[in-house]
Amino acid sequence: MIDTLIPTPTDTAEPAVEERTPKMSARDVKVFYGAKEALKGVSIDIHDDRVTAFIGPSGCGKSTFLRCLNRMNDTIPSARVTGTIELDGEDINSAAMDVVQLRARVGMVFQKPNPFPKSIFENVAYGPRIHGLAENKSELEAIVEKSLKRAGLWDEVKDRLNESGTALSGGQQQRLCIARAIAVDPEVILMDEPCSALDPIATAKIEELIHELRGRYAIAIVTHNMQQAARVSQRTAFFHLGEMVEYGKTSDIFTNPREQRTQDYITGRYG
Amino acid sequence: MSSRAASRWTDGSMGKRVAKRYAAERRFRLFGLAAVGLSLAFLAFLLITMLMKGIGGLSLEFLSNSDATEAANAGVWGALKGSLLTILVTMAIAFPIGVLSALYLEEFAPRNRWTDLIEVSINNLAAVPSIIFGLLGLAVFLNFMHLPRSAPLVGGLTLALMTMPVIVIAGRNAIKSVPPSIRDAALGVGASKMQVVFHHVLPLALPGILTGTIIGMARALGETAPLLMIGMRAFIATPPRGITDPSSVLPVQIFLWSDEVDRAFVEKTSAAIIVLLIFMLLMNGLAIYLRNKFERRW
């Protein structure tokens, strides 16, 4: 019955929809910018103990899809989203779902590091503060310390928490943004090309961090770096021209893709 | 072949082109310097003549007396206090309303024909001659609302109408220049629209908004025409005790004194100009200080 919802795969060796209850599941998600259909019916499950990577050439809709998962597309007036996306079985686009709470549960890390022009401490403390997660100052300090430790930044900044977050290096800024996202204790973390503005060493640190965060959070990462997808993810979805062409185990996608288009992309014919 | 390509950079024609380029650069610098010099010369001329004519008129008495029929007893205190009260009223009305309008239009209002119309209207409003605002103030505040004539309250309200569009335009530009990534960042951790605006956008836009407010306020402080329309040109010998008392303002006082037949008022006029300029300088200084204090870099 579920199979009828999946548009492309004919081979059921690794279906996009698994038997197990997923953390988030998307069914036939379409996005229109005005009259243009940017995403043509995507169905994917995201599980909470895995890293799911979305790959594909520029403009293929992978970031658009990622932004549907915490309704960041709401901020674009011309964007219209159809289909259903569920978080723990709850429709995130329903009237009962509070978008502010959704974004606290489904955190996001952006392409360009975007710390607030405030102190390092304030950057991490902002989320917990607006959601009232800390009763007092010492609890808030504990949350900030824990988040910075998890983001692997604590040792580098513990003596200068009052310095501006924008004074850090690019890689440190991005880890600060990750710390800011995990400070509100989300269930899912979405990463939109988190390393595209970083040098290889900073990239390696972020990838290491993604490994450490796996298991604690469901992670979905958009990347146009195929090696990165291969390194950090367990599941990979390949997008092309607004369609999700193929979704499966990362190892299968890279070694034994079912679709010709996936094969062409990962071997570098286009993209 | 390669030797010919190399010689192109060293033969005489290249040297001539380079010399031409340098000459153009020197000419531009000269014209630029002349333009700056010309405007500075006018400023220096104004300051020097005012100081020469007016410095003798500046005394404690001049600063503490109000207008009088006798030049010897005439002082600027009434007009100074009137200006201060008027500008406070203008500030209290125009700043919050202007900033709220800018925030609403930029962050909350839908983009449609109506908001386009509003945008055009506001831009036009900023270019309306000040005398028209004076007539509007006369019609609305005096004839319709029956507020007290010649009072800083009405003067302030009229100038607020005139200043508001300037603040709205500057405010919208400042809000527009806050990078969208900051909004995304705040939304991404679950901030509501209001929290995004008041925790992040407004603080980052504030320096720009203050710059616009400085320009608007400086213009309002020196404004004469609209205040004449609402009766602030009356002869008033006692300083106002509140915003509803009849009062004069500095630029109107200067205008009135410059019209006097009595030669002794020439000195008074120049002295009043010096006081007005110092008043403006202090206000702008305060505003720039505030702006720099709030300025953040990212």
Image: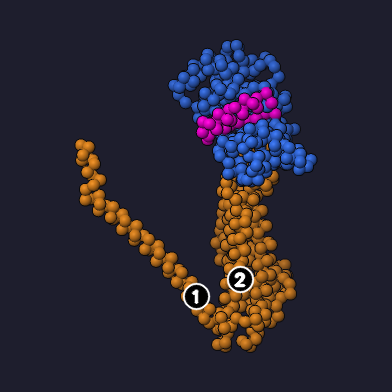
Chain colours: A blue, B orange
Q: Is residue B262 above or below residue A44?
A: below
The numbered mark, 2 or 1, whose residue comes first in the sequence reads 1
Q: Residue B151's image quarter?
A: bottom right
B265 on left or right of B66 = left
User: Where residue B148 sits in the image (x, y, percent)?
Assistant: 72, 72
Residue B126 at least partly seen: yes
Which amino acid, mark 2? Phe
Relative vertical location of residue B224 with respect to residue A233 in this rendering, above or below = below
Is A191 included in the stretch rendered in magenta? yes
**Quadrant in which the N terminus of chain A appears:** top right
Q: CA distance from mark 2 to mark 1?
A: 16 Å
> Is B217 included in the stretch rendered in magenta?
no
Residue position for label 1:
B46
Q: Residues within 10 Å of mark 1 (few under 14, many from 20)?
A: few
Residue B225: in sight, yes or no? no
Task: Find numbered disc 1 in the image and state the secondary structure of the residue it sits on.
Answer: helix
Question: Which residue carries the number 2 mark?
Answer: B279
Q: Position of residue A232 (x, y in %)?
A: 58, 23
- Judge by depth and name the residue closer to the eye, B267 or A153: A153
Which residue is at a point 56% across and 15% down the rendered structure image? A252
Q: Is residue A159 above or below residue A209?
A: below
Which chain contains the residue that carries disc 1? B
Residue B93, image quadrant:
bottom right
Packing grade of label 2 (10 A; few <14, some 14-19, many >=20) is: some
The location of residue B253, given as percent across then percent down, is 61, 78
Residue situated in front as seen by the camera: B89 or B10: B10
**Residue A6 bears which disc, if any?**
none
Q: Which residues are magenta?
A: A187-216
- Residue A103 in the image: state x and y as whole percent: 68, 34
Asked whether B131 or A114 is in front, the reply is A114
Residue at image point 58% right, 79% down:
B271
Amino acid at the residue labelled 1: Leu
